[in-house]
Amino acid sequence: MTILETARAGRVTDEVATAARTEGVEPEALAASVARGEAIVCCNRNRGNCRPLAIGKGLRTKVNANIGTSKDQMDPDLELAKLRAALRAGADTVMDLSTGGPLVEIRRRILAECPAPVGTVPIYQAAVDAVERGGTVLDMTADEILDVIEAQAREGVDFVTVHCGITRAGIAFLESQKRILGVVSRGGSFTVAWIRANGAENPLYEHYDRLLEICREHEVVLSLGDGFRPGALADATDRGQIHELMELGRLTRRAWDAGVQVMVEGPGHVPLDQIRANVELQKRLCHGAPFYVLGPLVTDVAPGYDHITSAIGGALAAWAGVDILCYVTPSEHLGLPDVEDVRRGVIASRIAGHAADVAKGVPGARAWDDAMARARADLDWDRQIELAVDPDRARHVRERCLPENADVCTMCGEFCAIRVGREGA
């Protein structure tokens, strides 16, 4: 039986019990949430080094970090350095999005070293394989795509992004409302191009039952991808996006019926005033399944600072009910991130998620802030650094700005409000 099926039977698996301890919740409560589809516990049964992770309603907002090569930058050692940076910064999951170099070797090295759940977008490898055989993305077959998914599941991949909700009918809806940027999801663009060129239905939609069989056998979480996610504010919440979301709701039900856990992916570039509506619509159409969003980015004009635009949107989205934030780095829209970009992206999304957790009343969230406040009241600098979301950065700034009187900081010095209030002027 799968984790979902066991939870529906009223029993607690070892994976659920472990994840519940990490979250500080009762195992029975987490199992009940999994049974309802409101939470997932991510852990491929073929991996021996993965810490089971719970994602969903009432739990701490999680952060995913994307790493991976391209044809222009395909150093496996660099991707391992990014993996380590992401984990040190507090990433809860990591996705390998490699499209260049030895893809299988890179993924296996990441799986071997990473104690957190690892996700992929399998159509990337299927596309690369097709090109290396002398063809194009359009030459992929349904069997080849599904064979890649099965191979990755056997290797231990914990969750897969699959763009099953793109259909021929959905493409017509998308085209009925002209976009500035069209399809910006790479996997989504592969799928749309394939459907148009072959005059056939999306292979992952048509052969969805086989996909579910693979995920059920290996305990792989389906991350139902948003191939029509908006890549510009002007394209947000249009017909194509909503049509796909409605289809993802139907596919969620089918996955649950097969005993497969699901989370649903979402936008993208969304104006602040549309974020809550997008989250509430997803939760309604997808029956409360965990929601996983990229950003969302709330403005299009900040290349080099999109970790900030993403954190603004991520905080509001998580407050509205999003369960896991996919980080955005300063390199978004410009190029592959380096190690420092990865660190900054994770920290920015963690801040956003934590701010939302405080607002939502997630157990333990506010206690962290209160501990920091007490450390500041005591002018306990060591404790403040220890409690910081990024202790290394906090320590660096403190040492750079260390005043003669180490009890205060160089912002106020002898006029420190806390010291004056405590000791009198």
Image (spheres, grey):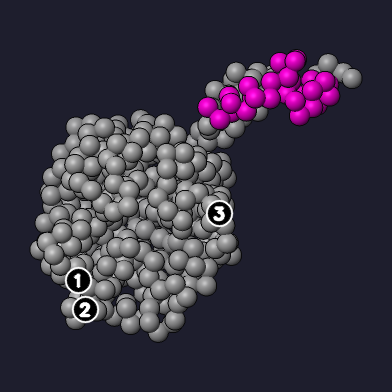
Amino acid marked by disc 2: Ala
State which quarter of the image contains the C terminus: top right
State how far apart marks 3 and 1 are (Cα): 35 Å
Q: Are circles 2 and 1 on residues that touch, CB within 8 Å? A: yes
> Does label 2 or label 1 sit earlier along the sequence?
1
| Residue at figure coordinates x 76%, y 29% from the top left | 411
Q: Is residue 320 left or right of residue 249?
A: right
State how far apart marks 2 and 1 are (Cα): 7 Å
Amino acid marked by disc 3: Thr
State how far apart marks 2 and 3 are (Cα): 36 Å
> Does label 2 or label 3 sit earlier along the sequence?
2
**Residue identified by numbered label 3:** 309
**Residue identified by numbered label 1:** 138
- Against 308, residue 53 (above or below) is above
Is residue 330 visible from the viewing direction of this image?
yes
Give the residues drawn in magenta, as a range.
392-421
**Residue identified by numbered label 2:** 197
| Residue at figure coordinates x 19%, y 76% from the top left | 201
In this orientation, which residue lies closer to the viewer: 190 or 169? 190
Question: Which of label 3 and label 1 is nearer to you?
Answer: 1
Q: Secondary structure at mark 3?
A: helix
In this orientation, which residue lies closer to the viewer: 246 or 412? 412
State which quarter of the image contains the N terminus: top left
Q: Are circles 3 and 1 on residues that touch, CB within 8 Å? A: no
